């Protein structure tokens, strides 16, 4: 019984680590205009591989991962995709864009 529980937990965790949603550059731009809570909504650039730029959006306990083809979206000072959060860059989108306009 313990073995089946362990297998179930591993499969459940693996299901939560799904591929990022692939969107177009236009779709990504539109997504950056919507959020629930401006105090917590934030976009990160996670880096790029040879084909895609990767982004993560956090808002009220929800995390969404996106990727967009490099030829559809420009990222200034791109860097290799990394899982190390300390290297991610906060993007000037969503509520962050409003904060930067005020300063």
Image (tube, helix red, strand yellow):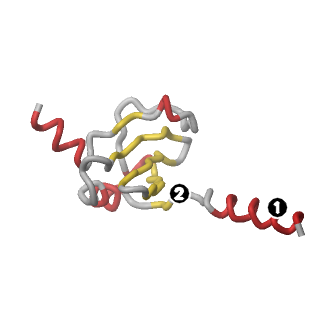
Residue placed farthest to the front in the image?
1
Distance between the alpha carbons at the discs numbered 1 and 2: 26 Å
| Number of numbered tags placed on the structure image | 2
Q: Quadrant of the N terminus?
A: bottom right
Residue placed farthest to the left in the image?
102
Disc 2 is placed on an element classified as loop
Tell me where residue 2 sits by quadrant: bottom right
Residue 33 in the image: above or below residue 101: below
Which residue is rendered at x = 54% and y = 38% of the image?
81
Q: Quadrant of the C terminus?
A: top left
Q: Is residue 61 left or right of residue 101?
A: right
Provide the residue designation for mark 1. 6
Q: Is residue 50 left or right of residue 98?
A: right
Q: Given this view, does label 1 or label 2 mark the residue nearer the observer?
A: 1
- Residue 68 lies, in percent from the top left, at 44, 53
Residue 102 in the image: above or below residue 4: above
Provide the residue designation for mark 2. 20
- Residue 58 lies, in percent from the top left, at 40, 51
Which residue is rendered at x = 26% and y = 40% of the image?
92
Disc 1 is placed on an element classified as helix
Label 1 Cα crowd, 10 Å radius (few <14 / some 14-19 / many 20+): few
Tell me where residue 36 sits by quadrant: bottom left
- Residue 88 lies, in percent from the top left, at 45, 34
| Nearer to the camera, 90 or 26 | 90
- Which badge, 1 or 2, comes first in the chain's sequence? 1
């Amino acid at each position: 019984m313990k073995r089946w529980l362990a297998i179930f937990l591993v499969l459940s965790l693996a299901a939560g680590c799904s591929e990022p949603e692939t969107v177009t550059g236009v779709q990504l731009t539109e997504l950056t205009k919507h959020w629930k809570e401006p105090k917590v909504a934030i976009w990160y650039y996670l880096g790029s591989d040879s084909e895609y730029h990767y982004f993560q959006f956090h808002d009220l306990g929800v995390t969404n991962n996106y990727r967009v083809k490099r030829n559809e979206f420009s990222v200034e000072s791109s860097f290799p995709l990394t899982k190390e959060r300390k290297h991610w860059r906060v993007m000037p989108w969503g509520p962050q864009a409003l904060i930067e306009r005020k300063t």
